[in-house]
Image: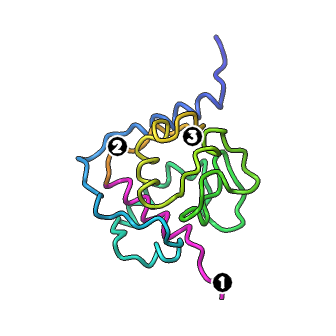
Amino acid sequence: MRKSNPFFLLLVVLILVGCGKSKPSADVSNNNVPSDLSSQEILNNSSVQGDYERGRQLFLQCRACHSLKINESHKVGPNLYGILGQESGNQEGFDYSDALMSSKILWNIDTLDQFLQKPYAFIPGNRMVFAGLKNASDRLDIISYLVEETAEKDQK
């Protein structure tokens, strides 16, 4: 009998979690925020109408790979603090794929939505082992959570 590779098992679990059943899709086209807003402006923009608490619950499947707080270390994926308004592949100390580094995508509500829907299709060749979220409402909920949790807040 052959032993299983723990990394392979983790990969399979992450892919299966990302392939869960979803509710009927919702239209989020009216919830886009202009890409030139800072993360704080995005946080304050009332057009981001996802469910924060549902987004927190959905993000549980992401936290094995991503941290969200300032000064937290990278995991398998990069720390996402301050991601909104930033260009892709710019977190210092993380080894990004060539595909992500060369994509020059500005992370905003629209690009996050497209990436979370099908990461492998939005940026072919990226190394994120997540199948994506088909349900637009789920994506908007996670994005709302990310907007709140990763916004660069004033340190008073």
Q: On the picture, is 18 further left or further right than 80?
A: left
Q: On the picture, is 22 further left or further right than 97?
A: left
**Above or below, 139 relative to 149:** above
Name the disc covering residue 15, or none.
none
Q: Circle 1 sits on which residue? A: 155
Among the two numbered marks 1 and 2 on one chain, the one whose residue lies closer to the N terminus: 2
Cβ–Cβ under 8 Å for marks 3 and 1: no
Q: Can residue 17 be seen at all in this image of the molecule?
A: no
Label 2: how many Cα within 10 Å (few below 14, some 14–19, many 20+)? some
Residue furthest to the top: 1
**Above or below, 108 relative to 122:** below
**Residue 65 location (% of width, % of height):** 61, 48
Q: At label 2, which amino acid type do we have?
A: Lys
Q: For the point 67% across and 68% down, which residue is it?
A: 70
Q: For the point 63% across and 44% down, which residue is it?
A: 102
**Residue 128 location (% of width, % of height):** 57, 40
Among the two numbered marks 3 and 1 on one chain, the one whose residue lies closer to the N terminus: 3
**Above or below, 40 relative to 27:** below
User: Which residues, given as a range, are shown in magenta?
Assistant: 137-156
Secondary structure beneath disc 3?
loop
Most common secondary structure along the magenta stretch: helix
Name the disc covering residue 134, or none.
2
Tell me the CA gap for discs 1 and 2: 36 Å
In this orientation, which residue lies closer to the viewer: 77 or 112? 112
**Residue 10 in which image quadrant:** top right
Name the disc covering residue 128, or none.
3
Quarter containing the C terminus: bottom right
Q: At label 3, which amino acid type do we have?
A: Met
Secondary structure beneath disc 2?
loop
Tell me the CA gap for discs 3 and 1: 32 Å
Quarter containing the N terminus: top right
Q: At label 1, which amino acid type do we have?
A: Gln
